[in-house]
Image (tube, rainbow, N blue to C red):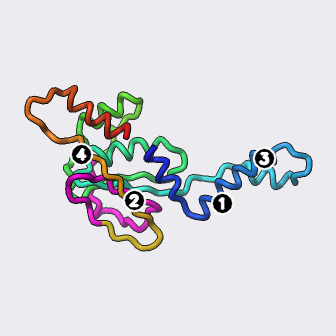
């Protein structure tokens, strides 16, 4: 799962929180574990990972990734943007996500220039065949590149169902 790959690109602090949760599951209810330790380890740690998904138009791939990631509890902030935003989310992206119970109708096509990418823990570019947005980051953020084909192409004679298949593939990959 691509979203889990972002989650696995965590900071040492996040790894500590995961380790604490593992320790908590092992020590819960044990008589030899101090009660305050059990209480501290049982307390859920708030999600702290901020992720940005980028592509060119911010109308399909990055919108799908944003919708999928927003359903994961370990992200405190999820955004998507494009280097040349189209101004709209593609209806077939909305339809493909609706099929799996995720509503992205409220998402909008945004310009990456409106964000400070260095405030994100991970910045993921999702372009394959065209020129990807240029991402210049300081050391804090991690840049990941996942080359997904653009499902938004128009091919003469193609049915809506054939187009939707491409959006499903982008969603499921």
| Residue 47, percent from left and from top | 56, 53
| Neighbours of disc 1 within 10 Å: few (<14), some (14-19), many (20+) | few
Quadrant housing residue 139: bottom left
Q: Alpha-carbon distance for marks 2 and 3?
A: 33 Å
Which sits earlier in the primary sequence, circle 2 or circle 3?
A: 3
Which sits earlier in the primary sequence, circle 1 or circle 4?
A: 1
**Residue named by callout 2:** 144
Q: Alpha-carbon distance for marks 1 and 3?
A: 15 Å
The C terminus is located in which quarter?
Answer: top left
Q: Alpha-carbon distance for marks 1 and 4?
A: 37 Å
Quadrant housing residue 111: bottom left
Which sits earlier in the primary sequence, circle 3 or circle 4?
A: 3
**Residue named by callout 1:** 16
Q: Alpha-carbon distance for marks 4 and 2?
A: 17 Å
Q: Is residue 55 left or right of residue 14?
A: left
| Residue 97, percent from left and from top | 35, 34
Q: What's the magenta bit mostly, secondary-structure-wise?
A: loop
Q: Are marks 4 and 2 in contact (CB under 8 Å)?
A: no
Q: In percent of the image, x 47 and y 57: which residue is there?
A: 50
What residue span does the magenta drawing correspond to? 108-134
Q: Nearer the viewer, mark 1 or mark 4?
A: 4
Q: In percent of the image, x 35 and y 30: which residue is there?
A: 98
Is residue 42 located in the magenta-colored stretch of the structure?
Answer: no
Q: Alpha-carbon distance for marks 1 and 2?
A: 22 Å
**Residue named by callout 4:** 150
Q: In percent of the image, x 20 and y 49: which residue is there?
A: 87
Disc 4 secondary structure class = loop
Which sits earlier in the primary sequence, circle 4 or circle 2?
A: 2
Determine which of the numbered discs, if any, sits on residue 26 in the image: 3
Q: Nearer the viewer, mark 1 or mark 2?
A: 2
């Amino acid at each position: 799962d691509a979203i889990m790959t972002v989650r696995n690109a965590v900071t040492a602090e996040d790894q500590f929180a995961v380790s604490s949760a593992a320790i908590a599951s092992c020590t819960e209810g044990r008589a030899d574990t101090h009660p305050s330790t059990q209480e501290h380890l049982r307390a859920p740690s708030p999600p702290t990972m901020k992720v940005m998904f980028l592509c060119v138009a911010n109308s399909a791939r990055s919108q799908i990734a944003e919708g999928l990631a927003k359903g994961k509890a370990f992200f405190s902030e999820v955004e998507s943007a494009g280097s040349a935003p189209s101004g709209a989310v593609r209806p077939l992206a909305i339809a493909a996500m609706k099929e799996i119970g995720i509503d992205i109708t409220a998402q909008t096509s945004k310009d990456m220039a409106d964000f400070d990418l260095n405030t994100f823990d991970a910045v993921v570019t999702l372009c394959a065949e065209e020129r990807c947005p240029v991402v210049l980051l300081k050391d804090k953020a991690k840049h990941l590149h996942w080359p997904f084909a653009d499902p938004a192409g128009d091919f003469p004679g193609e049915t809506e169902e054939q187009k939707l298949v491409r959006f499903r593939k982008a969603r499921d990959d």
